[in-house]
Image (spheres, rainbow, N blue to C red):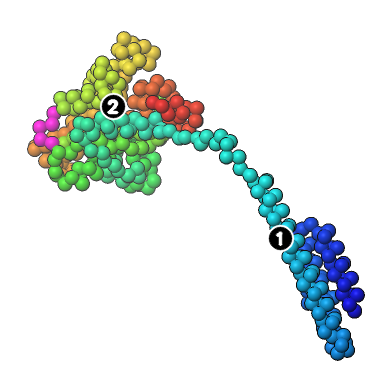
Amino acid sequence: MKDKLLSLQQEALDTLHQSTSLSELNDLRIKYLGKKGPITEVLRGMGSLSAEERPIIGQVANEVRAAISEAIQQKQEKLEKEETDRKLQVEKIDVTLPGRPSEKGSIHPLTKIIQEMEDIFLGMGFQVAEGPEVETDYYNFEALNIHKNHPARDMQDTFYITDDLLLRTHTSSVQIRTMQNMKGEVPVKIICPGRVYRRDDDDATHSHMFTQIEGLVIDKHIRMSDLKGTLLQFVKEMFGNDTEIRLRPSFFPFTEPSAEVDVSCTVCKGKGCRVCKQTGWIEILGSGMVHPKVLEMSGYDPKEYSGFAFGTGVERIAMLKYGIEDIRHFFTNDLRFLKQFAHI
Ligand code: PHE
């Protein structure tokens, strides 16, 4: 019995010596020390031994078990350490390697122009207002003196959502919202940047979605010369001090009189070139004195108050300022285009 136990110990230690993984060790532990293992079996059969043999065999069995268990424990520690060393080796990080540069985004050229325009107008005492892109017929048309069946509705092909809901075709809707919020108070002096939508076929100069900046001033004694002075100051700051403007008579249902405003060509400085079609002038916005009916509908007495308004296309301004020849560049997100504005 004793010899059997000792040879079991030898056998276990030999196998142990050859094992190379933690899972093999585990198998070994179950095989020799487990409940169904040979040593447990010996201990269980102790009852059939003689009184003299029992303590001797019991002691040997316990020693053999301890020896195997101890050997397994040591081997396990050794394997675990090897495993850790191997991992440390494989997962070693070379802290001296240069890092991967992270791509830096840049501000979109339209956002840049909007920020620049906001700065210019804030400097003249304006505040920035906002309004929803999904509008009701009332704010986009009716309150701007554009009744149903008014031919001016054809000027702006509209995306309708329902009979009464639409995507705003201009930021002029914010004029009305602002007047209503101000409840007859003056001065009103706001600009409103925002997206607008029209059912246009997209080409180099048209986009079904574009950006406008609306301006509205209401107070006592506001005159057309205030409109002209404000816009002249704006174009000089935006395009340079030598820029001139000219006002041409025009028509909008919500302004009277109305004027289209041209800047002297930013490319040829008014001499005539391809960009200004040899005229020396480029149209940049629509404007006028707020129509008395519009004032009245939104709670301002036209006998007491007057005002001016203008609406300009931000893409147009950006195209002129940066020499961009196709409006679609603003919306196709080609990084080769966008990256050119990172340092401007
Ligand atoms: N809303 C007009 C347009 O989109 C521009 C405009 C605004 C004209 C304010 C006059 C006054 O064409």
Q: Is 90 in front, or is 148?
A: 90
Rendered image quadrant of residue 203: top left
Q: Earlier in the sequence, mark 2 or mark 1?
A: 1
Q: Which mark is residue 108?
A: none
- The dominant secondary structure in magenta is loop
For residue 266, side relative to residue 21 (left or right): left
Circle 2 residue:
285
Query: Measured from the top left, where is residue 227 in percent x and y?
Result: 19, 27
Query: Measured from the top left, where is residue 323 in percent x and y?
Result: 40, 20
Is residue 34 visible in this depiction of the protein?
A: yes
Q: Which mark is residue 77?
A: 1
Rendered image quadrant of residue 223: top left
Crowd tier of the residue under label 2, counting other residues whose Cα lies within 10 Å: few below 14, some 14–19, many 20 or above: many
Q: Residue at coordinates 70% horizontally, 57% vertically from top-left?
A: 80
Q: Quadrant of the N terminus?
A: bottom right
**Amino acid at pointer 1:** Glu
